[in-house]
């Protein structure tokens, strides 16, 4: 079995929804790239990233954040 961590994004931040309710979210980190790097440092090789803004709106919204995570780019959005 392999563990695949996940990062859910709203407004470019890492969040957790309570029972899938967008009005009941907790921001647990403002820097998704830092979270991705923590997972990598822990030895995890895969990452599941969910653009919740995009899921709600029907198109990619957090593309800059996704690009930063995929490329490891430190540049700000």
Image (spheres, helix red, strand yellow):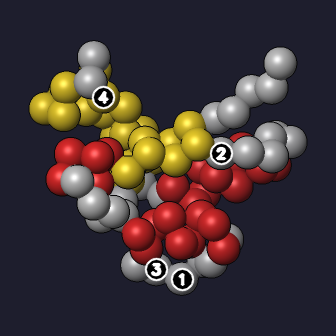
CA separation in Å, label 4 and label 3: 25 Å
Which mark is drawn over residue 76? 3
Q: Position of residue 27 (x, y in %)?
A: 34, 40
Helix, strand or loop status at disc 4: strand
Q: Which residue is drawn at the image coordinates 21% and 45% (left, top)?
A: 56
Residue at the disc numbered 4: 17
Q: Residues within 10 Å of mark 1 (few under 14, many from 20)?
A: few
Task: Answer whether labels 1 and 3 touch (C-beta < 8 Å).
Answer: yes
- Where does the image place residue 45, in percent across and percent down from the top left? 80, 46
Relative image position of residue 39 (x, y in whole percent): 72, 44
Whichever of callouts 4 and 2 sits on the residue coming sooner in the sequence is: 4
Mark 2–mark 1 Cα distance, whole angstroms, equals 20 Å
Residue at label 1? 75
| Position above or below: 17 against 54 | above
The quadrant where residue 19 appears: top left
Q: Nearer the viewer, mark 2 or mark 3?
A: 2
Q: Position of residue 65 (x, y in %)?
A: 46, 66
Q: Can residue 11 be seen in the rendering of this structure?
A: no
Q: Nearer the viewer, mark 4 or mark 3?
A: 4
The quadrant of the picture occupied by the N terminus is top right
Residue 33 appears in view: yes
């Amino acid at each position: 079995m392999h563990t695949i961590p996940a990062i859910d994004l709203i407004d470019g931040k890492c969040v957790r929804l309570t029972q899938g309710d967008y009005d009941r979210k907790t921001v647990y980190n403002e820097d998704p790239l830092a979270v991705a790097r923590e997972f990598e440092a822990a030895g995890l090789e895969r990452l599941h990233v969910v653009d919740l803004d995009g899921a709600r709106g029907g198109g990619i919204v957090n593309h800059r954040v996704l690009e930063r995570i995929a490329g490891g780019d430190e540049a700000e959005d």
